[in-house]
Image (spheres, grey):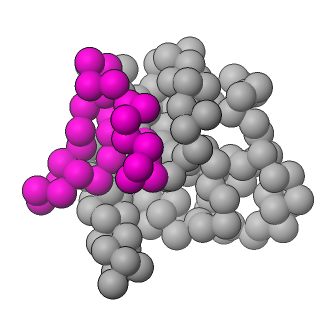
C-alpha cells in the first residue's frame, strides 16, 4: 500500500513538472540515491530537456548507464556550480534535513526553482514564509521554493 501511494505521488509530481517546466532546458535531481525512476519519467515526459542526476556516491554514479540521463558525482554541500548553470528546476526526493540549507543556497545561486519532497516527519524544516505547498489533486506532493517568478 505504501509503495503504491509513493508511486502515485511521484507520478503526480512528474505530471506537475511536465506541465510547469515544459520549456526547461535542464532539470536536476540532487541526491538521486539508488532510484532513477522519477528522473527517467521526467526525461520521457520532457524529451527536449537535459535531465541530470547527482549523488555524492562516486562509485554508484560510475556504475550507472542511465541512457539519456546524465549521472554526475557531486556533493551539494560543496557543489560544482558550473554543473547546475542553466537549470530551471532542481529537485530532491526525501533529502536529509541537514542538506536543505545547501539546496536552497545552490538554487539561489543559479536562479533555479527548488522542489523538495521531504520525508514526512521533516516538513517542519520548510518554513511557510519561503516555501509553498505543492498540491496536486488535493494531495501535497512536495514543497516549492520559486525563484523564477
How far across and how far down the image is residue 122, in percent? 44, 43
- The residue drawn where x is 52% and y is 60% is 39
Which of the 4 image quadrants contains residue 42?
bottom left
**Residue 51 point in image, percent of width and height:** 55, 51
Observer-nearest residue: 57 or 37? 57
Q: What is the span of residues highlighted in magenta in the rendered image?
A: 116-144
Q: Position of residue 149 (x, y in %)?
A: 26, 19
Q: Vertical placement of 143 versus 146: above or below?
A: below
Q: Nearer the viewer, residue 58 or 26?
A: 58
Residue 110 visible in the snapshot? no
The reply to whether residue 56 is visible in this rendering is yes
Q: Is residue 61 left or right of residue 146?
A: right
Q: Quadrant of the N terminus?
A: bottom left
Q: Position of residue 46 (x, y in %)?
A: 40, 56
- The residue depicted at 18 percent of the width and 48 percent of the height is 135
Q: Give the camera-side residue of 51 and 94.
A: 94
Q: Magenta stretch containing residue 143, yes or no?
A: yes
Q: How many marks?
A: 0
**Residue at (24%, 43%) from the top-left corner?**
134
Using residue 60 as the reference point, say whether residue 5 is left or right of it: left
Amino acid at each position: 500500500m505504501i509503495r503504491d501511494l509513493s508511486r502515485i505521488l511521484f507520478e503526480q509530481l512528474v505530471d506537475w513538472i511536465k506541465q510547469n517546466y515544459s520549456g526547461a532546458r535542464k532539470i536536476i535531481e540532487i541526491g538521486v540515491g539508488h532510484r532513477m525512476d522519477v528522473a527517467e519519467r521526467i526525461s520521457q515526459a520532457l524529451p527536449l530537456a537535459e535531465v541530470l542526476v547527482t549523488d555524492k556516491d562516486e562509485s554508484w554514479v560510475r556504475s550507472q548507464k542511465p541512457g539519456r540521463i546524465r549521472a554526475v558525482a557531486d556533493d551539494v554541500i560543496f557543489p560544482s556550480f558550473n554543473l547546475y548553470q542553466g537549470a530551471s528546476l532542481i529537485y530532491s526526493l526525501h533529502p536529509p534535513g541537514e542538506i536543505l540549507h545547501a539546496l536552497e543556497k545552490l538554487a539561489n545561486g543559479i536562479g533555479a526553482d527548488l522542489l523538495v519532497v521531504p520525508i514526512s516527519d521533516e516538513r517542519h524544516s520548510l518554513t511557510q514564509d519561503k516555501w509553498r505547498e505543492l498540491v496536486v489533486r488535493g494531495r501535497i506532493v512536495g514543497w516549492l521554493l520559486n525563484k523564477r517568478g
